Image: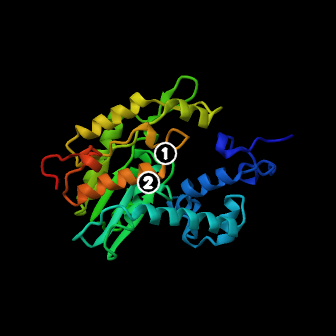
Amino acid sequence: MSFGYDPRAGRYVGGAAFGLPEPARPPSGADELRLLVRFEHPAKFLAVAELPGAAFLGDACRAAVYATEPAALDAIERELEAEVRAAARDLPRVAAFPSGTFVALGDSITDDAQSWAELLRHCLDPDVTVVNAGISGDTTVDALARLYGVVSLRPSVVVAMLGTNDCQRHGPHGALLVPPEVSLRHAREITSWLQATGARVIWLTPPPIDEAALAAAVRPRPLEVRATDLDRVRHALLTSGLEVVDTGLTTTDLLPDGLHPSLTGQVKIARALLRHLAGQTTSGAGGSPVGHIHRGVGQP
């Protein structure tokens, strides 16, 4: 008897972990491997599961998770980092940023090895510790559940981008994972908890999606994300009174999967946030708007 095993298509059954025979290893092309290395980080998943050896995974172990060799994994990681460093050269630097710990909280859009958070590493003072606390697949529920780990860092600034995964609809009836009003309640709870420790909390609006491209990318899984649901999350944030930066992305800033920003899109997110942090007018070349800043009463 054979067992399907293709995580990228949502088929996870197989192997001793499920009490089943070991399946054949699914093939992975160069492009798919690059995407996996860019967006999926096993050490983070294991650390959130509170496995104590997560931070000490060796190269051979990490490469095996991606079904590749250590040399191939190293080459991809170096390439991704070099592209981030090059893209960050044109971004503004923030002077007099508060020293301490800067935490980026989010899902795969933040966890991305080429995300706005990774770009910021090259734009903040060397005495600022940048922690990328993005975990691929996270909803606002997941972020709230693991927030104690972020609080323990005693960050001076936390920037959060969440809500995309809340808008997932699963199954034959398209059940919504987290309603927008609940996403906003979680955002308020996350903000309140972090502010109680003295952190400044800034929210980024999640980027739009291309429904057709996403449907093609996840086929044949019974999963969808509707643009209208995501728009409701964005509107809820912008009218919440929280400190929010509207990143102003469009579907042209997305990868072919219709969900994740391209490196160009990530640069736009980073630029909007950096200008907000610097207290400058949020505008692009020629004065075109890149993002809009929304501050609630009593917010910095």
Q: Is residue 80 above or below residue 268?
A: below
Q: Position of residue 107 (x, y in %)?
A: 45, 50
Q: Circle 2 is placed at which residue position?
A: 110
Between 256 and 2, the one nearer to me in the picture: 256
Q: Position of residue 285 (x, y in %)?
A: 29, 50
- State the image quarter where residue 38 is shown: bottom right
Residue sticking out furthest to the left? 298
- State the image quarter where residue 102 is shown: bottom left
Split into 4 quadrants, where in the image is the C terminus? Answer: bottom left
Q: CA distance from mark 1 to mark 2?
A: 10 Å
Q: Residue at x 49, y 45 (%)?
A: 260
Callout 1: helix, strand or loop?
loop
Can you tell which of label 1 and label 2 is closer to the viewer? 1
Q: Is residue 34 visible?
A: yes
Labelled disc at residue 260: 1
- State the image quarter where residue 77 is shown: bottom right
Would you say 281 lies left or right of 128 here? left
Query: Which amino acid lies under the numbered mark 1 shown in the image of this protein?
Result: His
